[in-house]
Image: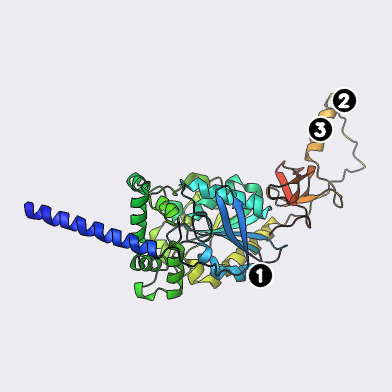
Amino acid sequence: MAVFLRRSLKLIFLALVGAVLLTLRYIIKTPQPLKSILPGKDHLYKWTYGHIFYKVLGEADAPPLLLLHAPGIGASSHTMHALMEPLARHFRVYAPDLAGFGLSDRPNMAYTADTYIKLGHDFLVEVIGQPAMLLASGLSCNYSIVIARDTAEFCNGVVLLSPTALFAQSERKQRPWLAQLAKNPVVALMLYSVLTTPFVLRALVAREDATGYQDVAQAKLAYVSAAAHQLGAQHAVLAHLAGALDLDVTDQLERLTQPGLVIWGANALPHSRSIASRSAVTQLKEASPVYGAGMQVQEECPDEVVADILAWHKESEQEKAPAAPALQEQSPAKEAPVVREDVVPQVQEKQAATSVPVAGSTEPEAYCVKCRQKRVMQNAARIVTKNGRAAMEGRCPVCGTKLFRFIAGEKEKV
């Protein structure tokens, strides 16, 4: 018994010494130089919880597309780099680093799923300012479902890349013990130092890319390591590992009104149930699995991903195209119906509430996500957004949905 106790104490001592050495190594190597390799123009969005770094690429009048990378160790918008240029030929692409990751601020705060839902909502409203399509990977697929549901007037579709987290959340359990340990800054830094060692990062990248340990691209490993070795990078990662960023959206999927597309990396399918088997999410179309790819399907097979997105988007636009309205002409041979005087005001009021302004009106127009076409704004009013951009705000004369559009040429911000 005494021998066992001595050996246990020795092992504990050696483990503590090793953790201290790894922590010192992390401190010496942090921060590392980090620069976004994504094409496009650099921007900073002054958000509630710090500055959010993002890239923009594509024509100003192209349909907007927001890319949301997954949270994780060394995570950033870098995982979307292979999609930027090909998608920017058809869309105006926005690629932010999530709060706590990449080149965005990494404050020491309580990171939760609501943090990133709020970020997505505020980015759509304050930066993009018009209906946009969401493209998300990993756990951000869950966030995009909530963002699309709660911000319907600014989201017209979702694309989900290998969304295994959509069905894993109900099976995962939060780790309160890890959350408690992470509250101690010294212990948190020691834990994070172990997780960012080269062999752990290589194993993590190999798992996500569905490749061999020795086959990990050195350039990607170097970028992930640099992103992981930033001051304050441990806060969001430890919250993720503790389960604080998890979000079960199984019920909310049933209330999703926008069209959606799911693109699977075939090697990610064994870890999750297929969405196609769930009748509650029939509005999400599944593309054929991309063989040879895993969780990071957008990095491993970007050409296939872009082709699937463009084909689905074209099909969605064709479905949105409104049919020519049938003009109902009253036959002169028929007598006009007799309307009682006491119901005339009610009839007129109903007609006024549902009538659509005629084409050629000088009133401002905006896209209605519910009607899926442009409408002349009802009760249009000129406003100025928080970031100083001039805009028009009103209501759809048909369904009453809130309409919004920026006034071109007046302090345009992209």
Left or right, 39 with respect to 291, comes to right
* Element assignment for label 1: loop
Residue 247 seen by the camera: yes
Residue 341 screen position, x and y as percent? 87, 25
Q: Are marks 1 and 3 in contact (CB under 8 Å)?
A: no
Residue where numbered disc 3 is placed: 349
Residue 303 or residue 274, whichever sits in front: 303
Q: Secondary structure at mark 3?
A: helix
Query: What x and y, as percent, mark residue 233?
Result: 45, 57
Q: Which secondary structure lies at badge 2?
A: helix
Q: Which residue is drawn at the image coordinates 84% and 33% (left, top)?
A: 348
Taking the image as shown, residue 263 lies to the left or right of residue 157, namely left
Splitting the image into 4 quarters, where does residue 87 fall?
Answer: bottom right
| Horizontal and vertical percent position of residue 56 | 63, 63
Query: In the displayed image of the protein, which residue is found farthest to the top?
Result: 342
Depth check: give the residue in front, 174 or 412. 412
Return the mark for residue 341.
Answer: 2
